[in-house]
Image (cartoon, rainbow, N blue to C red):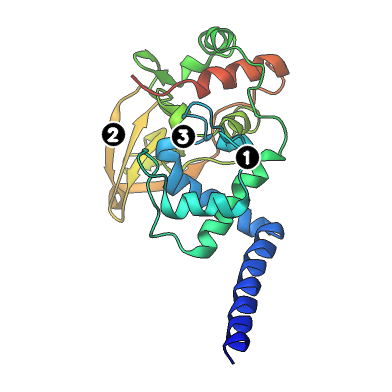
Amino acid sequence: MQRHVTAIVFCALASFAGARAASAQHATAYDVEDGARTFASTCAACHGPDGNLIPGIDLGHGQFRRALTDRELENIIENGIPSTAMPASPLLGEEQVQRLVAYLRSNAVQKPPAGKGGDPARGKALFEGKGECTDCHRIGTLGSRTGPDLTRIGLQRRALEIEQSLLDPKAEIQPNNRLVRLVTADGKEVKGRLLNHDTYTIQLIDWDEHLRSFNKADLREFRFEDTPMPSLKKKLSSQQIADLVAYLSSLRGP
């Protein structure tokens, strides 16, 4: 009887372990996407949006300090690493952890990282020169405020996302970076970058870098428009794009 019970327990545990392994091996696109969201909300604060802020580790490209199985990775995520800054993640469910591992594994087989081979110094020169980026964007005290401030962009966006914004600016626009056009009660047109809006009011920074606030009830018209940022695909070479991505990825604030 005891052998029979032991056998049942062993089979159940083996089945559970097999299910976890099968789940990790057959991750869907949704699993990877959901894992990316978990990484951004749980891991990026310490590891950075590209996963490369900690020496010897590049989670954005599947590089760990030593080879790890999926189960070992799950255990580190769930329980942390004692006597280190790596905390446990008790709020993550089992499926979330598995999807996070699926995302980390997917990074190891993606195309070479954006900005690879790029030179930040050359990228800085492009940003301030040929790229004409300072016409709209600001880094520290240099540049315009009409576009998003890029002083900490390396902590906020992954290199691949930065590259996409340079090549195809319309592909993804952050909510607080949208361009708005409005017409006041006396017929004046105002355009600028949205800062905030609610049911009753809207705040923006106009093309003259003035902070403006309006009551929506006083407006004749209010609408979002396409981003004015042009694609740099034809303006810069692939090497120059890599240089610019390398520079922007290096920006992490003061």
Q: Position of residue 133 (x, y in %)?
A: 51, 17
- Tags 2 and 3 in contact by the CB under 8 Å rule? no
Q: Which mark is residue 67?
A: 1
| Residue 43 in view in this figure | yes
Residue type, numbered disc 1: Ala
> Mark 1 or 2, which is nearer the eye?
1
| Left or right of residue 124, residue 147 in this image | left
User: Residue 94 placed where, x, y %?
Assistant: 51, 64
User: Going from the N terminus, do you reach mark 3 or mark 1 first?
Assistant: 3
Which disc, if any, is residue 39?
none
Residue at 35%, 31% (x, y): give it: 205
| Residue positioned most to the bottom | 1
* Alpha carbon distance from label 3 to label 1: 21 Å
Which image quarter is the C terminus in?
A: top left
Secondary structure of residue under mark 3: loop
Considering the numbered disc 2 on the image, is that residue within a helix, a strand or a loop?
strand
Q: Which residue is mark 3?
A: 48
